[in-house]
Amino acid sequence: MGYKVTIFLAFVALSAAMLELPSYWLHRGFDITDGELKSFPDYNLQLSTTCNEINLNTGSYDYKGVAMSGYLNIGKGNSALAFLFFGK
């Protein structure tokens, strides 16, 4: 029984190591050595962003700077990344 656990752990370790190799990610369209997406004819990624100004000058906030909120819509499975920016 002990050798089966050892074989399973070795398989998991080798699988995890394979996912960290740059050649694996290059095959999928990502060159992790320079951080840029390679251009493949069949790879299409739709990005859109929405940005809105927030008025925090009134009420209990009394913030005199610029505040912006919005989201980055990635277009895969309705995924989005929300953001808030505060500045002077």
Image (cartoon, grey):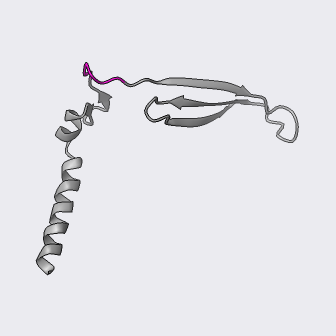
- Looking at this view, name the residue that lies furthest to the top: 41
The mark total stands at 0
Vertical comparison of 85 with 19: above or below:
above
Q: Is residue 64 left or right of residue 53?
A: right
The quadrant holding residue 38 is: top left
Vertical comparison of 71 with 61: above or below:
above
The quadrant holding residue 50 is: top right
Q: Is residue 31 left or right of residue 68?
A: left
Q: Position of residue 22 (x, y in %)?
A: 20, 40
Q: Main secondary structure of the magenta part?
A: loop
Pick whichever, 35 or 79, lies toward us.
79
**What residue sits 19% from the left and 45% below the top?**
21
> Magenta segment: does it hold 37?
no
Q: Position of residue 76 (x, y in %)?
A: 43, 32
**The N terminus is located in which quarter?**
bottom left
What segment carries the magenta color? 39-44
Q: Position of residue 48 (x, y in %)?
A: 51, 23
Q: Position of residue 9 (x, y in %)?
A: 19, 67
**The C terminus is located in which quarter?**
top right
- Looking at this view, name the residue that lies furthest to the right: 59
**What residue sits 59% from the left and 36% below the top?**
83
The quadrant holding residue 3 is: bottom left
**What residue sits 27% from the left and 36% below the top?**
32
Q: Is residue 21 left or right of residue 67?
A: left
**What residue sits 53% from the left and 36% below the top?**
81
- Looking at this view, name the residue that lies furthest to the bottom: 1
Q: Is residue 47 left or right of residue 42?
A: right
